[in-house]
């Protein structure tokens, strides 16, 4: 699936959603969610390819595997939270969208603690 098809699906869904929003808001929200999931399904193989390339690069650079997995998890959390926050915003729930974004930031901080600790240990070793 190329980007033109993805954009076409998004635009058709947008027109339908805007048309239905006045009379059937519950269906328009459902269509928005289904369209987002459908587009995500179309691009999941591209995401898997990017992860595979990054994994190969980390192996070639002799990076510790924990750093690679942490980076992939951070990227995944960011995308999932952005997706959820956008759905909440589309549904008119800006406050919930903000909470989803906050939860994502906290989870990213928690997951990146091992990298932060390793960095601090390296700085302590370098200092006299």
Image (tube, grey):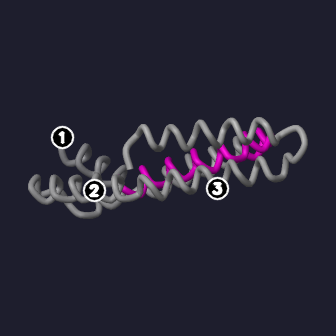
Q: Which residue is mark 1?
A: 128
Q: Which residue is mark 3?
A: 34
Callout 1 environment at 10 Å: few (<14), some (14 to 19), or many (20+)?
A: few
Residues at circles 1 and 2 in contact by the CB criterion of under 8 Å: no
50 vs 34, left or right, is left
Discs 1/3, front: 3
Circle on res. 87: none
Mark nearer the N terminus (1 vs 3): 3
Q: Secondary structure at mark 2?
A: helix
Label 1 to label 3: alpha-carbon separation = 57 Å
Q: Position of residue 127 (x, y in %)?
A: 21, 40
Residue 16, picture quadrant: top right
75 vs 14, left or right, is left
62 vs 85, left or right, is left
- Residue 112 visible here: no
Residue drawn at x 44%, y 55% is 42
Q: Which residue is mark 2?
A: 49
Discs 1/2, front: 2
Residue drawn at x 54%, y 53% is 80
The tally of labels here is 3
Discs 2/3, front: 3
Label 1 to label 2: alpha-carbon separation = 44 Å
Q: Is residue 64 above or below residue 94?
A: below
Mark nearer the N terminus (1 vs 2): 2
Residues at circles 1 and 3 in contact by the CB criterion of under 8 Å: no
Q: Secondary structure at mark 1?
A: loop
Q: Main secondary structure of the magenta part?
A: helix
Give, as a single range, the part of the protein colored magenta: 71-96
Residue drawn at x 57%, y 56% is 37
Q: Position of residue 7 (x, y in %)?
A: 50, 38
Front one among 15 and 48: 15
Mark nearer the N terminus (2 vs 3): 3
């Amino acid at each position: 699936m190329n980007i033109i098809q993805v954009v076409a699906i998004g635009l058709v869904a947008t027109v339908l959603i805007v048309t239905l929003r006045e009379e059937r808001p519950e269906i328009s929200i459902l269509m928005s969610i289904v369209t987002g999931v459908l587009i995500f399904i179309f691009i999941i193989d591209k995401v898997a390819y990017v992860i595979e390339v990054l994994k190969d690069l980390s192996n070639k650079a002799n990076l510790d595997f924990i750093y690679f997995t942490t980076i992939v998890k951070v990227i995944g959390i960011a995308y999932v939270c952005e997706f959820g926050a956008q759905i909440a915003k589309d549904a008119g729930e800006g406050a919930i969208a903000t909470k989803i974004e906050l939860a994502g930031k906290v989870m990213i901080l928690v997951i990146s603690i091992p990298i932060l600790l390793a960095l601090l240990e390296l700085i302590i070793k370098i200092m006299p």
